[in-house]
Amino acid sequence: MRRCRAKAPAALILGAIACLIAASLPRSWWNQDGSSFSLLAPKSYRGLHPTSSHHHNTISWSMVIHDASIVMIFATVGYAAAYSQQRLLCVPHAVEEWAPGPPSPQSGALLAAGLYGANIAYNVVNKRLLLAHPHPCLVTGMNLFSSAGCCVLCWGLGLMRWPGRLESSVYLRLLGLAVFHWGGMLFSNISVAEVHISFTHTVKAAEPFFTALFTVALLGKKPTIRAWLSLLLVIAGIVVASTAETSFTWVGFWAAMASNVMVSLRTVLSKRLIESHILDPLNFQALLQCGAALVSVPVALCFNLHAVKEIALDPSAVSSAIMIGPLVWIFNVASIVVLVHSSPVVHAMIRSMRRPLLVLASIITFGTCLTWLNAMGIAVTILGALWFRYENEVKLERKPSTGNLKRLHANARHRAIP
């Protein structure tokens, strides 16, 4: 096992810089009463009383049944797609050497169904919660603590091996990554509270663009020309979708972009820690969730302290937050384990189709109105994202080697964020 360097981790330094920038923002960015930062109180809900918002967004049994049926439909679609691909594609010989035996099509398809179902259910429940209680800081903290509770439960029941005592340098690196993990979820929730889920995740499809930039800047690895062209297609699609988006606000747009930056930095900076094999994938995700939950406490209390009583008195809000934890944990575990129980090509297909299915499911669930220009922008963005995945993963994975498989296993460990 390799020891970590004693130098201050880049993730912690960048996280501290982000906090200093947020603390030094000009007074004009605050609301007129100076009580809360405008970005943390979406424009659509400013001036609305909590009681009126809650009254129009009460969660009913018919709503639950409607949402659950859509989740089941798309989970079934994911199962069918993964199963058919796994049956049609032969398991490469290198995979058989890497794993004790060839993966079963049934196991890979079930994991795909769990991944899609949990991801869609999380986003739907989270959107319902933000509609009823538009307090992104507090909702993000509740979600993270619920997910962290699942991690602690798995450790307590022996379902997951306790990582033991780690070096202080590892904790510092994890703290920096936890800041970016929390920031990615927070800005995503701000965007979801402000605009349609479909638009938020259309913008978030540009995440590979930022990941590629940070990979070049921090790791010195350059994508191919075709990969860059696919990312330009993603940007063009986002521009078209933004011009025709009925719910468009600059807050929602820039919050989704900020989420992309946070998640991309977390992805790139966590690569070195993951490749050091200090932590296994599940424990890495668990410690990241717990660290992000602790980071969320001071911000939630600073900006949304007044909303704690409001949410505590709403049983549906508490139950939604409790439900989100297992959904996030199922998604993370499925994202990690699916590589072991499916061929690399199918694994790339499963991850590539996650966001398109989520966009489609959110449009159906919330009855989002789309113009032809908006639909075209979403389609172009998704096609660009799929092209990028193909250029960077599928082409490589069709001719797997033992070295490539080891690299794919390492890379898959930090791509589990919903």
Image (tube, rainbow, N blue to C red):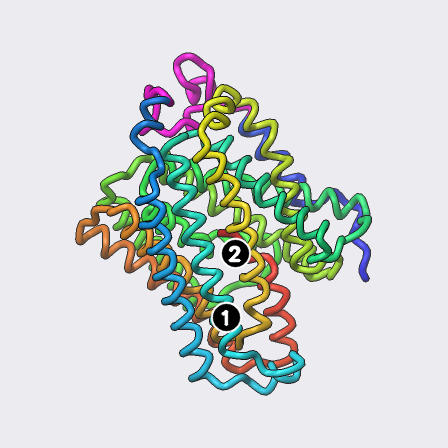
Secondary structure mostly seen in the magenta stretch: loop
Q: Is residue 370 above or below residue 313?
A: below
User: Which disc, if any, is residue 331?
Assistant: 2
Q: Quadrant of residue 273?
A: bottom right
Q: Residue at x 81, y 47 (%)?
A: 167
Q: Nearer the viewer, residue 140 or 52?
A: 52
Give the structural element (helix, strand or loop) at label 2.
Answer: helix
Residue 333 in the image, given as x and y percentages of width and height:
58, 59
Q: Quadrant location of the N terminus?
A: bottom right
Q: Is residue 27 left or right of residue 196?
A: right
| Residue projecting furthest to the front | 61
Q: How many C-alpha atoms fall within 10 Å of the one at disc 1: few (<14), some, or many (≥20)?
A: many
Q: Nearer the viewer, residue 58 or 260?
A: 58
Tell me the amino acid under the disc marked 2: Phe
Q: Nearer the viewer, residue 362 or 314?
A: 314
Q: Is residue 156 above or below residue 143?
A: below
Tell me the amino acid under the disc marked 1: His
Q: Residue at x 32, y 27 (%)?
A: 55
Would you name the residue on which mark 1 appears?
347
Q: Nearer the viewer, residue 213 or 112?
A: 112
Magenta residue span: 23-50
